[in-house]
Amino acid sequence: MTSRGGEAPLWQVRGVALSLARPVVMGVVNLTPDSFSDGGRYRDVAHALDQAEAMVRAGAGIIDVGGESTRPGAETVSAGEEADRILPFMEEGARRLGVPLSVDTRKADVARQALDAGAAIVNDVSALAFDPAMATTVAGAGAGLVLMHMRGGPADMAARAAYEDVGAAVAAELAEAVERARSGGIPDDAVVLDPGLGFAKEADHNLALLADLGPLRALGFPLLVGPSRKRFIGAVTGAPPEGRLAGTLAACVLAYLEGARIFRVHDVEPAVQALAVAEAIAAGRRDPREEGSRP
Ligand code: HH2
């Protein structure tokens, strides 16, 4: 591999070693009535399962399922309500979909029930800061874990978007999250890191992070990015959420070249295609530092 990423790691998710040798697309299924980008459309479980099956056919390697919106200012929902929204999908999806399911939650209670229903990965946008029981829940199930960077919660994160050096700060705060994971007994090979695009970040912070994932790469964990339809793409282009696909793909491709290996997106098929082309081009690239040293 000539794009930046070092050797191809494996991500251990409940007994399955997920290869990150090739880019992995994580398809988003939001079972929330108020998600900013596909609000309410997936509420019907049968429809959501059909959508997820279509994502898998299009090449999704993971399906990420959420029952609580985390957009700025969104209201928190109770663990009971969140579990009610996602469990029917998890139970049926674990049987039908044939790819690892991830649960997008900050609550250990919800994660435990989702893992019991067949989820393999916990995607915690609070990076284990919200619920002190989350680390042991993940460790106990041998689940994979996404540690995503944010500050505060959806209610106050916008006010906390102040950084001198956003890459260094996000890396330092993710390193603390890694320590929380280790203290809870989660092995390093179960962990993936995510800069948390749009979470406690202004548009410029997101762009700076995507321009240089070096400080995050230096932590030595696989990287996931979730640029899909986000506001910073609108800030650059003026496009509304449903018109941000091309911007999303640009962000995915550049993040891939910066070493990201997992891409959380709503539009799976275009992302799979864009990343396949990026991968094919990157594979043929010569590292200029090697020029002249070849036989
Ligand atoms: N972004 C959102 C939600 N979960 N998880 C990770 N790991 N990384 C992300 O960037 C990320 C995430 C927000 O996007 P969306 O799911 O479309 O919105 P909502 O939170 O309103 O459901």
Image (cartoon, grey):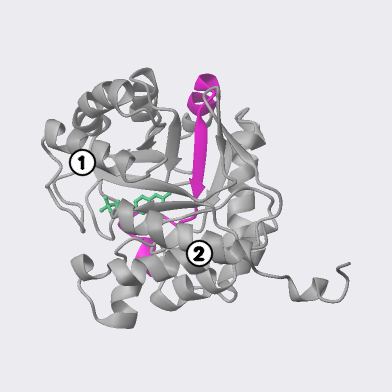
Could you tell me if residue 167 is visible in this image?
A: yes
| Image quarter (top left, top right, bottom left or bottom right) of the N terminus | bottom right
Q: Nearer the viewer, mark 1 or mark 2?
A: 2
Picture residue at 22% right of the left edge, 50% below the top: 75
Residue 189 at x, y = what percent?
Answer: 64, 35
The amino acid type found where label 2 is placed reads: Ala
Circle 1: is it few (<14), some (14-19), or many (20+) Cα within 10 Å?
some
Foreground pick, 21 / 138: 21
Can you tell which mark lies on residue 278?
2
* Residue, disc 1: 51
Relative to 115, 34 lies left or right: left
Q: Please, is residue 293 above or below residue 29 in the view?
A: below
Could you tell me if residue 258 is visible in this image?
A: no
| Image quarter (top left, top right, bottom left or bottom right) of the C terminus | bottom right
Residue 109 at x, y = what percent?
Answer: 36, 26
Picture residue at 47% right of the left edge, 66% below the top: 253
Which residues make up the magenta segment?
136-159
Asked if the magenta segment contains residue 24, the reply would be no
Asked if the magenta segment contains residue 150, the reply would be yes
